[in-house]
Image: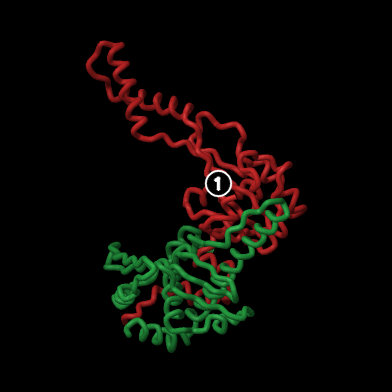
Amino acid sequence: MLDIATGYNKYKFLGNEFLTWIWYLIENNINIKELINSDYKTITLEIGNSIVLENSLGGKTKERISIKGDEAGLEEGKTALKKGGVVTSISLLLNIDTEEFKFLIKGESINITGFKTPSFKPENNEEIEGAIIEKAFFCEKIYNLIDALFNKFIEKRSSDAFRDKDFHKIKKWILS
Amino acid sequence: MAFLSSTSSISRYYIEGKFDDSIMDNLQTGLKKHSIPEIENEFGEVSAGWAPFENPYKPDFNKYSFGFGTYFLFNLRIDKKSIPSKLIKKHISIEIDKRLEKSGRSFLSKNEKSEIKDLVLDNLMRIIPSVPNIYEVLWNYEESNLFLFTTQKAANELFETIFLKSFNLKPIRLFPYTMIEKKSKLSDQQKDIIYNQSSLNYLK
């Protein structure tokens, strides 16, 4: 295994490619539940109110495109993709069966920020324990889904079929 | 209990290794050994350690629980003294004036000024109280999975150091490379393919 800092820097591009792929899945209505073979009844993903892209302009110079706001269109983001940009962070709305989760995920670290779970003010020890377990359950639910999606992406990315099929489909979407 | 009510930021770790004997005993020993000191360190800029989830200001792991269902939950508390630069500037200026008046000279040497700065910093550090920052640690021991409720680099680094010292188990931060190493089911051959690829260029 590589040194942690080296591994982080050398392969952070995979995280950004992963988020770009998630945007492709959402825009092309690809069935997430079927894709990751999940036992949940329904899984839907939507883009939330923020997306940040980065485009290398050669050397260490980078162009950063940040789209924020509930009514913001994604055209500028699409234009950035057409110039070779990748998604570096994206805000997502995730529905798993009847539960809705909102969070922002960063590509290079897969860190989550702005993760909101239902607010609950426990009044006794039993309620505290229940609330903690529920919160832990929500966190694991989100990350299990992220892991399943990331594993699917990496599995595809390492296959010949990716170069022959998926790559061209994504390219077609980007250039459309 | 901000953990239960507010919006969270999360960084995730894979915990390498398991305890050889009693989980609870090892955990309690590690938490106690590296709990945040109850008495504030007068001279230290940063002080960090574990504190109970239920009462982060009373680091008593005999009184407060850290096991909730199948999870362990406790806090990483980082107490930090930060002195505003304007305050330092003010006190240095006062001290320089005092020194000049006492000596009857019109200027001080570079060394004297540097000495005054160190003295001022020491004095201010002693009188300024630490500001506590509290980050929850949620650990699913069986799954070797741990959530640290912050994404601040300094907090992550302190967490990693204190965790290893406390439990002798290595926390490995999960990001694309370590997710492939620790969480994926890719074969060595598939990993080699991934590791030898460069970033995709859809414009080719």
Q: Residue at x 52, y 78 (%)?
A: A44
Residue A17 location in percent, x, y? 42, 73
Residue B107 location in percent, x, y? 24, 19
> Which residue is labeled 1 in the image?
B134
| Residue B55 or residue A99, whichever sits in front | A99
- Secondary element at image label 1: strand
Q: Residue at x 68, y 58 (%)?
A: B71
Q: Residue at x 57, y 68 (%)?
A: A142
| Residue B21 relative to residue A147: left or right | right
Q: Is residue A66 above or below residue A153?
A: above
Residue A128 location in percent, x, y? 68, 54
Q: Which chain is green?
A: A
Q: Kindly indicate the quadrant of the structure image that contains residue B119.
A: top left
| Residue B152 relative to residue A66: left or right | right
Do we see residue A147 in this rendering? no
Q: Is residue A142 above or below residue B127?
A: below
Q: Is residue B83 above or below residue A148?
A: above
Viewport quadrant of the C terminus of chain A: bottom left
- Shown colour of chain B: red
Colour mapping: by chain
Do we see residue A54 in this rendering? yes
| Residue B187 or residue B56, whichever sits in front | B56
| Residue B43 relative to residue A88: left or right | right
Residue A108 location in percent, x, y? 44, 64
Viewport quadrant of the N terminus of chain A: bottom right
Q: Residue furthest left?
A: B106
Q: Kindly indicate the quadrant of the structure image that contains residue B94.
A: top left
**Mark 1 Cα-neighbour bin, 10 Å: few <14, some 14–19, many ≥20:** many
Report the number of discs: 1
Q: Is residue B141 above or below residue A42?
A: above
Q: Looking at the picture, which amino acid does disc 1 mark?
A: Ile
**Residue at mark 1: chain:** B
